[in-house]
Amino acid sequence: HRSLVRCWLEAFETPSRIARWRCLWLQAMACVIFGSVASWPLAWSMGNTYCLLSAAIAGYGWYLLGPSRDFRCSRVLKAAGAASAAGVLASLALCCLAVVLLREVIVPTHSRSINFSPGIDVLVPGHTPACDMESTVASALEKLRSGQVEFGAETPHWDPKHGHCDCDSTLASSEGNCRWPEGGERMPTATIVHALVDLGRKRRSACDYLNFFIPHLMRNASMVVYTEEWAMPYVHAVRKHMGLEAKTIVRLLQASSDEEGGIFYQLLPQMQEVGNRNFLKLAYTRSARGGRVVAKYSWVNHLKQELLRRVARENPFGTEFFVWMDAGAGHGHVRVPQNLCVCASAVPGTVTLFHRRSSEEELFEVGLNGLTEQRWKEWDFW
C-alpha cells in the first residue's frame, strides 16, 4: 500500500504518462494478488488455462515494471514494481500449487469418503467386510429360531385357503395401495429381485445390512439375490431355515458380470472423476451427498434397473411380474407381510414406481427431499 502511495505521488510530480501507466499497472498487479487468492474456485473450474494466463500477465507486468533504459524511473518505483511482480508470481505459483493439490489429492480423497470409508472398492474378489460375519450369521439364525423377527400384517389380497393372491378379494375395492387397477391381473405372480454390495458405509456396516435383510429373506416369495461372495452363505442360510431354497437363486455379482453389458463397472473411474470435478461446487451449496460425488454409491443405485431387466428377461421362476426391493429397505424397523401380492401394480406391460410423497405434485415439484425446493431457490445461480 505504501509503495502504491509513493508511486502515485511521484507520478504526479513527474509529468510523464509512462509513470502514471506504471502506477496503474502496479495497482492492477496488487489486485491480481488478492484476486488470485479469492478466486480459487474459478481457478479450479478453469484449471491450467487460468494459471497460464495469470503467469503471462505477471510476466508482462515484470517486463513493464522492471529496470529498463527506455524509462526513467526512481528507485522507489523500480523497487515497488519488482516487488509487485515478484509477489504476483509467487501468488500465482501458490495458487497453481493449491489447485493441483485440491484436484489431485484433497478432493479425490474427500469426495470418495463422504459417508463412506475410503479405500473400499466394490466387486473385489475375496473381499471381506470389516465386521464379524460369523457372529452376524449365528445371531440372525438365533433370532429366527426364537421368533424375534416377526412378519407384519398379511397382505389383504392373500388367499390362505388356496395359497395364492386374489386381487378380486373383498378388499380389492378399498382406497390407497390396496386398490386393484383396471386391466390388472386377478392372480398375479411375482419375483423379488435384491442386491447387496459392501460400499464401506461409515454409519452402517455390511453386517448391519445383513440384519436389515432378514425380514425380506423370510418372505414366502420367489427371489433372485445378486451379491458379493461374502454374503452368499448368509442368504442361503436364512432361506434354508425358512424352507424356501426352491424359491431362491443367489448370483455372484462380479466385474465379469459386465460381459453382456449394462452394469458399466468399467466406467467407475470416469464416474468418480465427474464426482471429483463437481465436488467443490456441491460442497459450497451444501449438497455434496454420496449419490452425487461417490461413484460406487451412484453406480449401485443405477444398477437396480439392469438387474431387474435381466431377471425379467430370463424369468427363472416363470412369474408374470418382477419387483425390485432394496436389501436394506426399512433398515430393520419395518415389518413386511409374509406373502407378496402385487395387485396395486399388476397391469401387464407397465412399470410402477412407488414413492413416499402424498401426491404427484409433491413428488415432481417439491421432490423426495423436503429441502429440495428451498435449496434450488437459494442456489439457483448454479
Image (spheres, grey):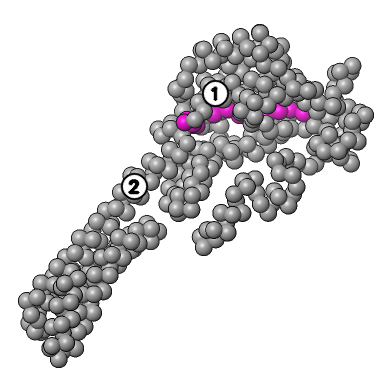
Q: How far is disc 2 from disc 1 in space, using C-alphas?
A: 33 Å
Within 10 Å of disc 2 (Cα), the crowding (few <14, some 14-19, many 20+) is few
Check residue 346 for magenta coloring: no
For label 1, the residue is: 208
Please name which of the two marks, 2 or 1, marks the residue nearer to the observer.
1
Q: What residue type is labelled 1?
A: Asp
Tell me what residue is drawn at x 59 percent, y 49 percent.
371
Q: Does the magenta stretch include residue 191?
A: yes
Residue positioned 62% across, 46% down in the render: 369
Query: In front: 313, or 216?
Result: 216
As helix, strand or loop, the secondary structure at mark 2 comes to helix
Q: Is residue 317 above or below residue 274?
A: above
Q: Which residue lies furthest to the bottom in this view?
A: 15
What residue lies at 58% left-to-right and 27% top-to-bottom?
196
What range is drawn magenta here?
A: 190-202
* Residue 104, numbered circle: 2
Residue 53 marker: none
Left or right, 352 with respect to 77, comes to right
- The secondary element bearing badge 1 is classed as helix
In this view, the residue in front, 202 or 222, is 202
Q: Earlier in the sequence, mark 2 or mark 1?
A: 2
In the displayed structure image, the side of residue 284 where residue 236 appears, left or right: right
